[in-house]
Image (cartoon, helix red, strand yellow):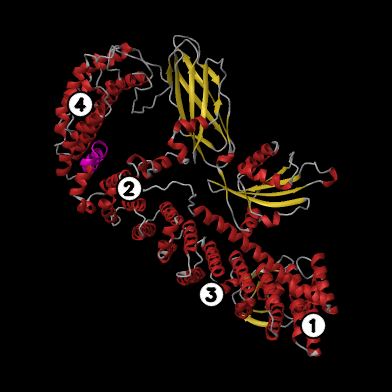
Amino acid sequence: MTAAENVCYTLINVPMDSEPPSEISLKNDLEKGDVKLKTEALKKVIIMILNGEKLPGLLMTIIRFVLPLQDHTIKKLLLVFWEIVPKTTPDGRLLQEMILVCDAYRKDLQHPNEFIRGSTLRFLCKLKEAELLEPLMPAIRACLEHRHSYVRRNAVLAIYTIYRNFEHLIPDAPELIHDFLVNEKDASCKRNAFMMLIHADQDRALDYLSTCIDQVQTFGDILQLVIVELIYKVCHANPSERARFIRCIYNLLQSSSPAVKYEAAGTLVTLSSAPTAIKAAAQCYIDLIIKESDNNVKLIVLDRLVELKEHPSHERVLQDLVMDILRVLSTPDLEVRKKTLQLALDLVSSRNVEELVIVLKKEVIKTNNVTEHEDTDKYRQLLVRTLHSCSVRFPDMAANVIPVLMEFLSDNNEAAAADVLEFVREAIQRFDNLRPLIVEKMLEVFHSIKSVKIYRGALWILGEYCSTKEDIQSVMTEVRRSLGEIPIVESEIKKEAGELKPEEEVSVGPAQKLVTEMGTYATQSALSSSRPAKKEEDRPPLRGFLLDGDFFVAASLATTLTKLALRYMSLVQEKKKQNSFNAEAMLLMATILHLGKSSLPKKPITDDDVDRISLCLKVLSECSPLMNDIFNKECRQSLSHMLSAKLEEEKLSQKKESEKRNVTIQPDDPISFMQLTAKNEMSSKEDQFQLSLLAAMGNTQRKEAADPLASKLNKVVTQLTGFSDPVYAEAYVHVNQYDIVLDVLVVNQTSDTLQNCTLELATLGDLKLVEKPSPLTLAPHDFANIKANVKVASTENGIIFGNVVYDVSGAASDRNCVVLSDIHIDIMDYIQPASCTDAEFRQMWAEFEWENKVTVNTNIIDLNEYLQHILKSTNMKCLTPEKALSGYCGFMAANLYARSIFGEDALANVSIEKPIHLGPEAPVTGHIRIRAKSQGMALSLGDKINLSQKKTSL
């Protein structure tokens, strides 16, 4: 047996700093030392054998002086020793001394202590010598009837491994274990016995299951899990068995163990596509989500529901369970709620939309009263967006939703109020019948709006959609109320002067120290004279915004007043009323202009706002038909175009999604009849248990994982040392989701034996070496594979570097060292395209502090081609709609977005142009600005763009 085949299952930590002891001193310690000394000596012997030393002279010493000891620590160490020590002569025959060892273990298998019996049985699972095992078989069989379950379950494992490796030693093992299983009461023993029957004799396992199929619910969860696996495998290989076992799987959905319920539901879905089966599995998943406290479990099970939804025939069944799915919203975690709302929105139909909207309205009202949780505001935003989507898809629902949502326009959280405003703007444009209702509700909440941004939006909606004389007058009343006393400048100056006048009120209060305007202290008595100053909070909202220096809202107000005045003139024929309204609108604009130019506001009015308000004054003074058309018709047309483009884009993305989900069958595809399919063809389908194992190991590319050799051939070999170095090394770099596996081939190119050959690695960036690779002994011209795991913590370009160090056998010199080439880890393995709304993009752009500006340096001459090249190189998604990028005007601006598997966001803004003055063959110029939360992400993405943009476009 070669060194590579001689597998050792026991990992031992090797201290490198101590000198290896001599064989004579070890022999002396093992013979004459006390138990403690013998324990230490035995540990040293084990470490030396692991390092390649043979030490044949110590074998008899250990048998004579250590093997008879009853100390438990020594017995454990001896199990490790007998596992790794060479047991055969160079010609392959068993050593004579092993007969004595065999006898000692026969005694241990009959030892009164159950721990010694059990650990000896575990050790026998690792023995690969049939001659050693043969004399022990009666004792192993006898252990099946031991009083302690620890011994019995290890005896089952020992019998299973011996039967698998040397069937002739115990040919009746399946029958023996079957009889043992029938009479066994302990859950862990039954589980091991059943597991053995599954792999050794599946028919016997099925026979046993058939006899107790009605009692399966009473079994322990570890046995139930194995039963689920057996049923899955049997039905996977032989579909005709489904009817026999599907009832059992249904029963296991009621198991008390969440793991069993989860596996049973997954198995049921693969075995049957009947609506009742899908409904039962989905119901089971929903119960698991609600009852499990771990948010990660909730997200995993939600993913299974999303997978179920992807199947067209299952979607209708899930639609009936939307109300049950919404019970998950009781979870406080935002990610779970987000995924649940998305799933509910995907499943909503005309049958259940009414119930869905009622639940969501209740949830929205709940969030109004809860402020202690930090995610409440974000959750409210999610609910508003979900209701928005429902109302757009089912217009009948909008009338129920709008009154509830419009209460939130006065909310302190600007983001939620902005979402409501966006929804209201779309609803009032699309649904003519709802306009009176929306205008009425808007006028009700108008005075309580606290955010200037929301105020501007509300003014625009009122200016655009108030079409009756009464509504227009109501808006004017609200604006006057919100602006306060006019002219503003004069009234504010009066107030300032009023504070100095001796208009005093007597107020009683405790004595307190105050700081005067000059900075000196003044004591105020209990009975004091003061005039209560008008607090800023008491100001009407619009007046407050203007005095804070926010005059953009004034420009918006001027536009609104102009629209209303022009519309009022067309509705009211009486000239006096027309002039009166017009004059009032112009007075308001003039007083705002006056305020802007005065020193009262915190910031003076900008020139742009002055121009806008002056233009509106000019329009109202002239009242030309052209301006009337622009203000009252074309503004609304622009909104209409924008909404229709947005709707078109949504429909396109939905169409793409549905095309992905629809299983298309080509005209010349062969039809597979289950009755005519050979068994081996049926088993060629993907095994779910195998897939879950591969996923746990990090092989996300399922097809690739099926053939590891093919996947290895596809990988690029990274050469780490030169061909003329004494040690040649090369590596395959396997990038899994959160870790990197380096498979390093090390070749000894010398004629010497290399001892303690160690691969020493270090990392740069957010990478962490999980464990240090253990040392090897390489024979002349021998080779070995060393695997090293590196954990990845964030999206950042990383470098792995290091060297190979070794000792030459017999040489007196210091350790030798071969330096390895650096391995660069590509950031692109962790970045995936993602999408977000424009508002989210702008918010993140403002929040992220790290920016990297990359100058465009390319030989690509077409703007669109360059953008596509950048998207391909960086795995980012273009958020700017196709319509906005279509056409050609010599420049282009686009927003890109991606998210890493660690949840980090990366934003980019491409701003490029074609320098026309340099001719048609001139390359694209411009800048790409990248923003990210972490410096590493911004720099790494910038480096990637710099490297890839210089490539020649093919």
How far is disc 2 from disc 1 in space, using C-alphas? 84 Å
Give the residue number, with chain letter if any, for mark 1: 582
Give the mark nearest the N terminus, 3 or 1: 3
Q: Residue 203 magenta-drawn?
A: yes
Crowd rating for badge 3 (residues with CA inside 10 Å; few <14, some 14–19, many 20+):
some
3D distance between C-alphas at marks 4 and 3: 76 Å
The residue that label 2 is drawn on is 675
Circle nearer the viewer, 4 or 1: 4
Residue 633 in which image quadrant: bottom right
Tag 2 near tag 1, CB within 8 Å: no
Checking the image for residue 168, the label placed there is 4
Mark count: 4
Taking depth in this image into account, of 503 and 607 the one nearest to the observer is 607
Which tag, 2 or 4, sits closer to the chain's start?
4
Residue 303 percent across, percent down from the top left = 44, 53
Describe the element under mark 3 as helix, strand or loop: helix
Label 4 secondary element: helix
User: Are dots 3 and 1 in contact, CB under 8 Å?
Assistant: no
Q: Residue at x 74, y 45 (%)?
A: 862
Q: As shown in the figure, which amino acid type bears the numbered disc 3? A: Asp
User: Would you name the residue on which mark 3 appears?
Assistant: 396
Instruction: Choose between 626 and 71: the one closer to the eye.
Output: 626
Q: CA distance from mark 3 to mark 1?
A: 39 Å
Separation of residues labelled 4 and 1 (CA atoms): 108 Å
**Span shown in magenta:** 188-204
> Which one is in front in this view, the residue at disc 2 or the one at disc 4?
2
C-alpha gap between disc 2 and disc 4: 38 Å
State left or right for residue 695 relative to residue 530.
left
SS for callout 2: helix
Question: Which of the two discs, 2 and 1, labels the residue nearer the N terminus?
Answer: 1
List x then y, in percent, for residue 405: 56, 72
